[in-house]
Image (cartoon, rainbow, N blue to C red):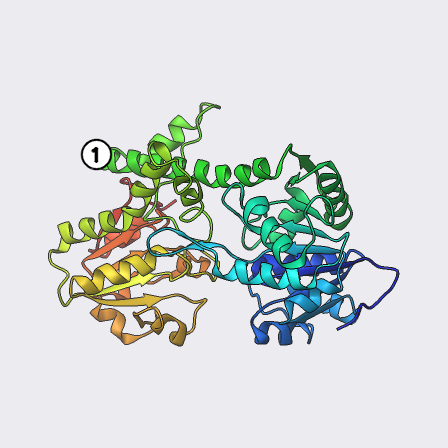
Amino acid sequence: MTGYSASLPNVAVVGLGKIGLTLAAVFANHRYNVFGADINPDVAASVNQGISHIQNEPGLDRLVLTAHKNNTLSATTNTAEATAQAEIIVVIVPVLTDEQNQVDYQLIDRAVAEIAKGIKKDAMVIFETTLPPGDTENRFGKKIEEISGLRPGRDFDLAYSPERVYSNQIIHDLGHYPKVVGGINEKSLKSAAAFYKNALGCKLIEVSSLVTAEFSKVAECVYRDVNIALANELAMFAEDKGVSMAEVISASNSQPYSNIHSPGIGVGGHCIPIYPYFFINKGLSTGLTPLSREINDSMADYAIGKIEKQIGSLKNKNTLILGLSYRGNVKEPTKSTTLVLIDRMLEKGANPFVNDPLFSDREIKQHGAAPLSLYDDNCSKIDAVILQSFHEEYNEIDFSQFTNCQLVLDGRNKLNSQEISRLGITYESIGNQGRQCP
Protein backbone atom coordinates (compact mmCIF):
# COMPACT_ATOMS: atom_id res chain seq x y z
CA MET A 1 0.00 0.00 0.00
CA THR A 2 1.62 3.26 -1.11
CA GLY A 3 0.64 6.93 -1.26
CA TYR A 4 -1.07 8.03 -4.44
CA SER A 5 0.14 11.58 -4.82
CA ALA A 6 3.25 13.17 -3.39
CA SER A 7 1.47 16.51 -3.45
CA LEU A 8 -1.26 15.44 -1.01
CA PRO A 9 -0.84 14.87 2.74
CA ASN A 10 -1.40 11.33 3.97
CA VAL A 11 -3.95 10.43 6.64
CA ALA A 12 -4.52 7.06 8.30
CA VAL A 13 -8.03 6.46 9.67
CA VAL A 14 -7.96 3.58 12.14
CA GLY A 15 -11.40 1.99 12.43
CA LEU A 16 -13.71 1.94 9.42
CA GLY A 17 -17.08 1.66 11.09
CA LYS A 18 -19.97 3.99 10.41
CA ILE A 19 -18.13 7.11 11.55
CA GLY A 20 -14.62 6.04 10.59
CA LEU A 21 -15.49 5.22 7.00
CA THR A 22 -17.41 8.47 6.65
CA LEU A 23 -14.45 10.46 7.99
CA ALA A 24 -12.08 8.61 5.66
CA ALA A 25 -14.31 9.25 2.64
CA VAL A 26 -14.76 12.93 3.47
CA PHE A 27 -11.00 13.42 3.97
CA ALA A 28 -10.29 11.56 0.72
CA ASN A 29 -12.63 13.93 -1.13
CA HIS A 30 -10.91 16.99 0.37
CA ARG A 31 -7.39 16.59 -1.00
CA TYR A 32 -5.96 13.97 1.34
CA ASN A 33 -4.59 10.54 0.60
CA VAL A 34 -6.38 8.29 3.07
CA PHE A 35 -5.24 4.87 4.25
CA GLY A 36 -8.03 3.18 6.16
CA ALA A 37 -7.31 0.40 8.63
CA ASP A 38 -9.80 -2.11 9.99
CA ILE A 39 -9.40 -5.57 11.51
CA ASN A 40 -12.27 -6.92 9.39
CA PRO A 41 -10.88 -8.13 6.04
CA ASP A 42 -14.32 -7.89 4.42
CA VAL A 43 -14.45 -4.19 5.26
CA ALA A 44 -11.02 -3.57 3.77
CA ALA A 45 -11.88 -5.53 0.64
CA SER A 46 -15.13 -3.61 0.19
CA VAL A 47 -13.44 -0.21 0.49
CA ASN A 48 -10.75 -1.27 -1.98
CA GLN A 49 -13.50 -1.95 -4.50
CA GLY A 50 -15.01 1.49 -3.96
CA ILE A 51 -18.00 0.05 -2.10
CA SER A 52 -19.31 1.27 1.25
CA HIS A 53 -20.18 -1.52 3.66
CA ILE A 54 -22.22 1.00 5.66
CA GLN A 55 -25.86 1.36 4.64
CA ASN A 56 -28.43 4.06 5.37
CA GLU A 57 -25.86 6.85 5.50
CA PRO A 58 -26.89 9.36 2.82
CA GLY A 59 -24.10 10.35 0.44
CA LEU A 60 -21.51 7.89 1.75
CA ASP A 61 -21.73 5.47 -1.19
CA ARG A 62 -20.95 8.29 -3.58
CA LEU A 63 -18.02 9.63 -1.55
CA VAL A 64 -16.40 6.20 -1.24
CA LEU A 65 -16.77 5.49 -4.94
CA THR A 66 -15.45 8.91 -5.95
CA ALA A 67 -12.40 8.59 -3.67
CA HIS A 68 -11.76 5.11 -5.05
CA LYS A 69 -11.84 6.40 -8.61
CA ASN A 70 -9.52 9.27 -7.66
CA ASN A 71 -7.10 6.85 -5.97
CA THR A 72 -7.26 8.77 -2.71
CA LEU A 73 -8.81 6.05 -0.52
CA SER A 74 -7.60 2.53 0.18
CA ALA A 75 -7.90 0.13 3.10
CA THR A 76 -5.90 -2.57 4.83
CA THR A 77 -6.08 -4.84 7.87
CA ASN A 78 -2.49 -3.88 8.71
CA THR A 79 -2.80 -0.87 11.02
CA ALA A 80 0.95 -0.47 11.48
CA GLU A 81 1.41 -0.33 7.70
CA ALA A 82 -1.28 2.31 7.27
CA THR A 83 0.15 4.35 10.13
CA ALA A 84 3.69 4.21 8.73
CA GLN A 85 2.56 6.00 5.57
CA ALA A 86 0.70 8.81 7.32
CA GLU A 87 1.57 12.17 8.78
CA ILE A 88 -1.83 12.29 10.49
CA ILE A 89 -3.44 9.34 12.28
CA VAL A 90 -7.12 9.57 13.26
CA VAL A 91 -8.34 6.89 15.70
CA ILE A 92 -12.04 6.02 15.75
CA VAL A 93 -12.11 2.50 17.22
CA PRO A 94 -15.12 1.81 19.47
CA VAL A 95 -14.86 1.72 23.25
CA LEU A 96 -17.88 0.08 24.86
CA THR A 97 -18.75 -1.35 28.27
CA ASP A 98 -19.08 -4.96 29.37
CA GLU A 99 -21.98 -6.60 31.19
CA GLN A 100 -20.75 -5.08 34.48
CA ASN A 101 -20.64 -1.62 32.85
CA GLN A 102 -16.85 -1.53 33.03
CA VAL A 103 -14.94 0.00 30.11
CA ASP A 104 -13.88 -2.56 27.51
CA TYR A 105 -10.57 -1.40 26.02
CA GLN A 106 -9.72 -4.56 24.07
CA LEU A 107 -10.23 -3.25 20.54
CA ILE A 108 -8.67 0.17 21.01
CA ASP A 109 -5.70 -1.16 23.02
CA ARG A 110 -4.93 -3.50 20.16
CA ALA A 111 -5.25 -0.70 17.62
CA VAL A 112 -3.02 1.68 19.61
CA ALA A 113 -0.32 -0.98 19.95
CA GLU A 114 -0.29 -1.35 16.15
CA ILE A 115 -0.23 2.42 15.66
CA ALA A 116 2.80 2.59 17.94
CA LYS A 117 4.61 0.06 15.74
CA GLY A 118 4.16 2.18 12.62
CA ILE A 119 4.18 5.78 13.82
CA LYS A 120 6.86 8.13 12.46
CA LYS A 121 8.56 10.98 14.25
CA ASP A 122 6.68 14.30 13.83
CA ALA A 123 3.38 12.57 13.04
CA MET A 124 0.13 13.63 14.68
CA VAL A 125 -2.28 11.25 16.42
CA ILE A 126 -5.87 12.42 16.98
CA PHE A 127 -8.35 10.34 18.96
CA GLU A 128 -12.02 10.75 18.01
CA THR A 129 -13.32 7.77 19.97
CA THR A 130 -15.32 8.81 23.02
CA LEU A 131 -13.05 8.12 26.01
CA PRO A 132 -13.06 8.41 29.79
CA PRO A 133 -11.35 11.70 30.69
CA GLY A 134 -7.59 11.30 30.91
CA ASP A 135 -7.26 8.27 28.65
CA THR A 136 -5.83 10.03 25.58
CA GLU A 137 -2.71 11.08 27.46
CA ASN A 138 -2.46 8.68 30.37
CA ARG A 139 -3.40 5.43 28.66
CA PHE A 140 -2.82 5.80 24.94
CA GLY A 141 -0.13 8.47 24.78
CA LYS A 142 1.91 6.48 27.27
CA LYS A 143 1.30 3.22 25.38
CA ILE A 144 2.53 4.73 22.12
CA GLU A 145 5.63 6.09 23.89
CA GLU A 146 6.28 2.76 25.58
CA ILE A 147 6.26 0.84 22.30
CA SER A 148 7.68 3.40 19.86
CA GLY A 149 10.06 5.32 22.08
CA LEU A 150 8.53 8.56 20.80
CA ARG A 151 7.30 11.02 23.42
CA PRO A 152 3.89 12.68 22.91
CA GLY A 153 4.14 16.45 22.71
CA ARG A 154 7.80 16.28 21.79
CA ASP A 155 8.29 13.63 19.10
CA PHE A 156 4.71 13.51 17.86
CA ASP A 157 1.60 15.65 18.30
CA LEU A 158 -1.24 14.24 20.35
CA ALA A 159 -4.78 15.63 20.17
CA TYR A 160 -8.36 14.72 20.99
CA SER A 161 -11.43 15.74 18.99
CA PRO A 162 -14.59 13.79 19.81
CA GLU A 163 -16.99 12.67 17.13
CA ARG A 164 -20.29 14.52 17.55
CA VAL A 165 -22.42 13.14 14.76
CA TYR A 166 -25.80 11.47 14.38
CA SER A 167 -26.47 8.32 12.37
CA ASN A 168 -28.15 8.94 9.01
CA GLN A 169 -26.74 12.48 8.82
CA ILE A 170 -23.04 12.05 9.55
CA ILE A 171 -21.79 13.84 6.43
CA HIS A 172 -24.05 16.80 7.14
CA ASP A 173 -23.00 16.93 10.79
CA LEU A 174 -19.28 16.82 10.00
CA GLY A 175 -19.62 20.07 8.12
CA HIS A 176 -22.09 21.79 10.44
CA TYR A 177 -21.32 20.79 14.04
CA PRO A 178 -18.46 22.72 15.67
CA LYS A 179 -15.40 20.50 16.15
CA VAL A 180 -14.11 20.47 19.71
CA VAL A 181 -10.31 20.13 19.72
CA GLY A 182 -7.85 19.71 22.58
CA GLY A 183 -4.11 19.03 22.53
CA ILE A 184 -1.39 17.83 24.85
CA ASN A 185 0.34 21.14 24.16
CA GLU A 186 -0.22 24.27 22.09
CA LYS A 187 1.55 22.89 19.03
CA SER A 188 -0.62 19.76 19.01
CA LEU A 189 -3.76 21.84 19.43
CA LYS A 190 -2.94 24.17 16.55
CA SER A 191 -1.87 21.34 14.26
CA ALA A 192 -5.10 19.40 14.88
CA ALA A 193 -7.24 22.52 14.48
CA ALA A 194 -5.55 23.35 11.16
CA PHE A 195 -6.15 19.80 9.92
CA TYR A 196 -9.88 19.85 10.71
CA LYS A 197 -10.29 23.32 9.24
CA ASN A 198 -8.84 22.08 5.94
CA ALA A 199 -10.41 18.61 5.97
CA LEU A 200 -13.92 19.44 7.14
CA GLY A 201 -14.33 23.20 6.80
CA CYS A 202 -16.34 23.32 10.02
CA LYS A 203 -16.22 25.73 12.93
CA LEU A 204 -13.71 24.89 15.66
CA ILE A 205 -13.85 25.12 19.43
CA GLU A 206 -10.29 24.97 20.76
CA VAL A 207 -10.27 23.96 24.43
CA SER A 208 -7.49 24.19 26.96
CA SER A 209 -6.56 20.53 27.34
CA LEU A 210 -7.05 16.95 26.21
CA VAL A 211 -9.08 16.13 29.30
CA THR A 212 -11.41 19.10 28.71
CA ALA A 213 -12.17 17.85 25.22
CA GLU A 214 -12.74 14.31 26.50
CA PHE A 215 -14.94 15.56 29.34
CA SER A 216 -17.07 17.67 27.00
CA LYS A 217 -18.15 14.69 24.90
CA VAL A 218 -19.12 12.53 27.84
CA ALA A 219 -20.93 15.49 29.40
CA GLU A 220 -23.06 15.86 26.25
CA CYS A 221 -24.25 12.26 26.60
CA VAL A 222 -24.88 12.58 30.34
CA TYR A 223 -26.98 15.68 29.68
CA ARG A 224 -29.15 13.79 27.22
CA ASP A 225 -29.44 10.76 29.48
CA VAL A 226 -30.50 12.88 32.45
CA ASN A 227 -33.13 14.73 30.44
CA ILE A 228 -34.55 11.54 28.94
CA ALA A 229 -34.71 10.04 32.43
CA LEU A 230 -36.60 13.12 33.63
CA ALA A 231 -39.09 12.75 30.77
CA ASN A 232 -39.56 9.06 31.59
CA GLU A 233 -40.04 9.80 35.29
CA LEU A 234 -42.61 12.50 34.53
CA ALA A 235 -44.39 10.22 32.03
CA MET A 236 -44.79 7.47 34.62
CA PHE A 237 -46.09 10.00 37.12
CA ALA A 238 -48.48 11.39 34.50
CA GLU A 239 -49.89 7.91 33.96
CA ASP A 240 -50.46 7.58 37.69
CA LYS A 241 -52.38 10.88 37.68
CA GLY A 242 -54.30 10.24 34.46
CA VAL A 243 -52.59 13.10 32.64
CA SER A 244 -51.44 13.08 28.99
CA MET A 245 -47.70 13.68 28.89
CA ALA A 246 -48.02 14.77 25.27
CA GLU A 247 -50.22 17.66 26.33
CA VAL A 248 -47.88 18.47 29.21
CA ILE A 249 -44.85 18.62 26.91
CA SER A 250 -46.65 20.83 24.39
CA ALA A 251 -47.81 23.23 27.08
CA SER A 252 -44.60 23.27 29.13
CA ASN A 253 -42.26 23.67 26.18
CA SER A 254 -44.11 26.80 25.05
CA GLN A 255 -42.01 28.46 27.75
CA PRO A 256 -38.65 29.20 26.07
CA TYR A 257 -36.57 27.84 28.94
CA SER A 258 -38.37 24.50 29.09
CA ASN A 259 -37.29 21.63 26.86
CA ILE A 260 -38.90 18.47 28.22
CA HIS A 261 -37.86 15.51 26.07
CA SER A 262 -40.13 12.77 24.75
CA PRO A 263 -40.41 9.70 27.01
CA GLY A 264 -39.92 6.22 25.63
CA ILE A 265 -39.48 2.55 26.28
CA GLY A 266 -35.70 2.80 26.71
CA VAL A 267 -32.42 4.24 25.50
CA GLY A 268 -30.02 2.41 23.19
CA GLY A 269 -27.10 2.87 20.83
CA HIS A 270 -23.37 3.39 21.18
CA CYS A 271 -23.58 6.61 23.19
CA ILE A 272 -26.19 7.35 25.84
CA PRO A 273 -26.39 3.91 27.55
CA ILE A 274 -22.59 3.63 27.65
CA TYR A 275 -20.73 6.90 28.06
CA PRO A 276 -22.25 8.00 31.42
CA TYR A 277 -20.38 5.03 32.89
CA PHE A 278 -17.13 6.74 31.83
CA PHE A 279 -17.92 9.28 34.58
CA ILE A 280 -19.55 6.84 36.99
CA ASN A 281 -16.51 4.55 36.91
CA LYS A 282 -14.22 7.52 37.47
CA GLY A 283 -15.94 8.46 40.74
CA LEU A 284 -19.28 10.11 39.87
CA SER A 285 -21.06 7.27 41.63
CA THR A 286 -23.94 9.18 43.23
CA GLY A 287 -26.37 11.83 42.04
CA LEU A 288 -28.24 12.39 38.79
CA THR A 289 -25.83 10.57 36.47
CA PRO A 290 -26.15 7.04 37.92
CA LEU A 291 -29.80 7.61 38.86
CA SER A 292 -30.64 8.50 35.26
CA ARG A 293 -29.02 5.30 34.06
CA GLU A 294 -31.16 3.33 36.50
CA ILE A 295 -34.37 5.03 35.36
CA ASN A 296 -33.72 4.64 31.65
CA ASP A 297 -32.55 1.05 31.99
CA SER A 298 -35.73 0.22 33.95
CA MET A 299 -38.12 1.30 31.18
CA ALA A 300 -38.20 -2.10 29.47
CA ASP A 301 -39.31 -3.77 32.71
CA TYR A 302 -41.83 -0.98 33.26
CA ALA A 303 -43.25 -1.61 29.80
CA ILE A 304 -43.55 -5.33 30.42
CA GLY A 305 -45.35 -4.57 33.68
CA LYS A 306 -47.88 -2.49 31.74
CA ILE A 307 -48.47 -5.41 29.37
CA GLU A 308 -48.95 -7.91 32.20
CA LYS A 309 -51.38 -5.55 33.91
CA GLN A 310 -53.55 -5.59 30.78
CA ILE A 311 -53.33 -9.18 29.55
CA GLY A 312 -52.06 -11.15 32.53
CA SER A 313 -49.25 -13.69 32.53
CA LEU A 314 -47.04 -13.74 29.45
CA LYS A 315 -46.46 -17.47 29.67
CA ASN A 316 -47.03 -19.01 26.21
CA LYS A 317 -48.16 -15.63 24.86
CA ASN A 318 -46.98 -14.60 21.40
CA THR A 319 -45.46 -11.13 21.53
CA LEU A 320 -44.28 -9.12 18.54
CA ILE A 321 -41.63 -6.44 19.01
CA LEU A 322 -41.47 -3.87 16.22
CA GLY A 323 -37.87 -2.78 15.65
CA LEU A 324 -34.64 -4.58 16.48
CA SER A 325 -32.62 -1.42 16.04
CA TYR A 326 -32.17 0.91 18.99
CA ARG A 327 -33.95 3.72 17.12
CA GLY A 328 -35.99 4.30 13.99
CA ASN A 329 -34.56 4.22 10.48
CA VAL A 330 -31.11 3.12 11.64
CA LYS A 331 -29.67 -0.38 11.35
CA GLU A 332 -27.88 -0.64 14.68
CA PRO A 333 -28.77 -3.13 17.45
CA THR A 334 -26.16 -2.01 20.01
CA LYS A 335 -27.76 -1.75 23.46
CA SER A 336 -31.20 -1.85 21.85
CA THR A 337 -34.11 -2.07 24.29
CA THR A 338 -35.41 -4.89 22.11
CA LEU A 339 -32.57 -7.11 23.34
CA VAL A 340 -33.72 -6.55 26.93
CA LEU A 341 -37.35 -7.16 25.96
CA ILE A 342 -36.46 -10.45 24.27
CA ASP A 343 -34.59 -11.66 27.39
CA ARG A 344 -37.43 -10.68 29.71
CA MET A 345 -40.04 -12.32 27.47
CA LEU A 346 -38.09 -15.57 27.40
CA GLU A 347 -37.69 -15.48 31.19
CA LYS A 348 -41.46 -15.16 31.50
CA GLY A 349 -42.14 -18.05 29.13
CA ALA A 350 -43.43 -15.90 26.27
CA ASN A 351 -42.73 -16.48 22.58
CA PRO A 352 -41.00 -13.31 21.33
CA PHE A 353 -41.15 -12.40 17.65
CA VAL A 354 -39.33 -9.45 16.07
CA ASN A 355 -40.01 -7.48 12.91
CA ASP A 356 -37.47 -5.05 11.52
CA PRO A 357 -37.35 -4.18 7.80
CA LEU A 358 -33.65 -3.25 8.06
CA PHE A 359 -32.53 -6.69 9.28
CA SER A 360 -32.59 -10.09 7.61
CA ASP A 361 -34.32 -13.06 9.23
CA ARG A 362 -30.90 -14.54 9.96
CA GLU A 363 -29.78 -11.39 11.77
CA ILE A 364 -32.93 -11.33 13.88
CA LYS A 365 -32.54 -14.99 14.83
CA GLN A 366 -29.00 -14.26 16.03
CA HIS A 367 -30.53 -12.11 18.76
CA GLY A 368 -32.72 -14.87 20.14
CA ALA A 369 -36.11 -14.08 18.62
CA ALA A 370 -38.13 -15.46 15.73
CA PRO A 371 -38.54 -13.10 12.75
CA LEU A 372 -42.06 -12.28 11.64
CA SER A 373 -43.10 -10.47 8.48
CA LEU A 374 -46.01 -8.07 8.76
CA TYR A 375 -47.51 -9.93 5.80
CA ASP A 376 -47.32 -13.34 7.48
CA ASP A 377 -50.57 -15.12 8.33
CA ASN A 378 -49.11 -15.79 11.79
CA CYS A 379 -49.76 -12.16 12.67
CA SER A 380 -53.24 -13.37 13.54
CA LYS A 381 -51.73 -15.40 16.41
CA ILE A 382 -49.99 -12.47 18.10
CA ASP A 383 -51.30 -11.60 21.59
CA ALA A 384 -49.44 -8.32 22.11
CA VAL A 385 -47.46 -5.88 19.95
CA ILE A 386 -44.72 -3.59 21.27
CA LEU A 387 -43.40 -0.70 19.20
CA GLN A 388 -39.77 -0.32 20.25
CA SER A 389 -38.23 1.62 17.34
CA PHE A 390 -40.35 3.53 14.87
CA HIS A 391 -39.15 2.90 11.31
CA GLU A 392 -40.94 4.88 8.59
CA GLU A 393 -42.39 1.61 7.27
CA TYR A 394 -44.47 1.36 10.43
CA ASN A 395 -46.58 4.31 9.33
CA GLU A 396 -48.47 1.85 7.12
CA ILE A 397 -49.11 -1.04 9.54
CA ASP A 398 -52.51 -2.66 9.09
CA PHE A 399 -53.43 -3.65 12.64
CA SER A 400 -56.65 -5.31 11.47
CA GLN A 401 -54.60 -8.43 10.64
CA PHE A 402 -53.77 -8.87 14.35
CA THR A 403 -57.12 -10.50 15.02
CA ASN A 404 -56.01 -12.14 18.29
CA CYS A 405 -54.12 -9.13 19.60
CA GLN A 406 -55.25 -7.83 22.99
CA LEU A 407 -52.79 -4.97 23.41
CA VAL A 408 -50.54 -2.62 21.46
CA LEU A 409 -47.91 -0.95 23.62
CA ASP A 410 -46.64 2.11 21.78
CA GLY A 411 -43.18 2.50 23.27
CA ARG A 412 -42.34 5.53 21.13
CA ASN A 413 -45.74 7.28 21.17
CA LYS A 414 -45.94 7.27 17.39
CA LEU A 415 -48.89 5.06 16.47
CA ASN A 416 -52.46 6.08 15.75
CA SER A 417 -54.22 5.31 19.04
CA GLN A 418 -57.74 5.89 17.73
CA GLU A 419 -57.29 3.56 14.78
CA ILE A 420 -55.98 0.80 17.03
CA SER A 421 -58.75 1.30 19.60
CA ARG A 422 -61.45 1.18 16.88
CA LEU A 423 -60.29 -2.36 16.11
CA GLY A 424 -61.04 -3.40 19.67
CA ILE A 425 -57.36 -3.57 20.63
CA THR A 426 -56.27 -1.93 23.87
CA TYR A 427 -53.80 0.88 23.22
CA GLU A 428 -51.12 1.72 25.81
CA SER A 429 -48.26 4.20 25.58
CA ILE A 430 -45.58 5.77 27.71
CA GLY A 431 -47.25 8.71 29.43
CA ASN A 432 -50.86 8.37 28.25
CA GLN A 433 -50.17 9.71 24.80
CA GLY A 434 -50.32 8.72 21.15
CA ARG A 435 -50.77 10.09 17.68
CA GLN A 436 -54.41 10.86 17.03
CA CYS A 437 -56.37 10.90 13.79
CA PRO A 438 -56.42 14.32 12.09
* Residue 261 pos. (x, y %): 41, 37
* Residue 63 pos. (x, y %): 70, 63
**Camera-nearest residue between 383 and 134:** 134
* Residue 147 pos. (x, y %): 62, 59
**Camera-nearest residue between 299 and 91:** 91
Q: Residue at x 30, y 33 (%)?
A: 234
Residue placed farthest to the right in the image? 7
Res 64 visible: no
* Residue 275 pos. (x, y %): 45, 46
Q: Residue at x 20, y 31 (%)?
A: 241
Res 112 visible: yes
Q: Residue at x 69, y 72 (%)?
A: 50
**Camera-nearest residue between 315 and 436:** 315
Residue of label 1: 242
Q: Residue at x 30, y 61 (%)?
A: 321
Tell how many labels. Answer: 1
* 242 lies left or right of 327: left
Q: Quadrant of the N terminus?
A: bottom right
Q: Quadrant of the C terminus?
A: top left
Secondary structure at badge 1 equals: loop
- Residue 80 quadrant: bottom right
Residue placed farthest to the left in the image? 312
Number of residues whose C-alpha sits closer than 10 Å to that of mark 1, classed few (under 14), some (14–19) or many (20 or more): few
* 346 lies left or right of 201: left
* 388 lies left or right of 424: right
Residue 256 to residue 411: above or below: above
Task: Identify the amino acid type marked 1.
Answer: Gly
